[in-house]
Amino acid sequence: MIIGRVAILLGALLTAWALAAHSAAPGPVTLQEKDRGRTITLQVGQKLLLYLRDPGSGGYNTNPPIFNTSILELGNQKKLSPQKPRAGDFGQLYYEWEAKQKGETDIIINIRRPWEKKAPEEYWRVKVKVE
């Protein structure tokens, strides 16, 4: 009788664990400047982390990222100070997205110098597929 109850409880726990493990989104995908031009695949709920060199040393400012906001949600963005300050090192730009629904979108980050009249230059781009 006790063995039967333990077996039922154990079976229920294993089922709950399997369901929780299956429904959890995979860990985050981390990209860097070298990943420019790639196509990446995310699952709904999965995070995308991006670290880029801050191009401020050339007098550039970054424009807000361009992407489809119904597919990805930008949760966090900030400028990170250099770990070992050196002349011309403005640190890194950090962005964090979460995949909200299935679809495809590009993430484009443009830069520009405030005093120049020309259109912004493309600094970084990837294609994101959410499944």
Image (spheres, rainbow, N blue to C red):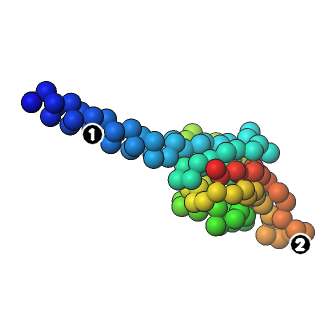
Q: Position of residue 27 (x, y in %)?
A: 51, 41
Secondary structure of the residue carrying numbered label 1 = helix
Q: Is residue 57 visible?
A: no
Give residue 12's mark: 1
* Front tag of 1 and 2: 1
Name the N-terminal-most of marks 1 and 2: 1
Q: Residue at x 89, y 72 (%)?
A: 117
Residue 33 lies in what quarter of the image?
top right
Residue 95 lies in what quarter of the image?
bottom right
Amino acid type of the residue tagged 1 in the rendering? Ala
Residue of label 2: 117
**Circles 1 and 2: CB atoms closer than 8 Å:** no
Amino acid type of the residue tagged 2 in the rendering? Lys
Q: Is residue 116 left or right of residue 98?
A: right
Q: Residue at x 31, y 35 (%)?
A: 14
| Residue nearer the viewer, 51 or 114 | 51
| Residue nearer the viewer, 85 or 79 | 79
Tag count = 2
> Counting other residues with Cα less than 10 Å from the Cα at mark 2, is it few (<14), some (14-19), or many (20 or more)?
few
Q: Position of residue 86 (x, y in %)?
A: 64, 42
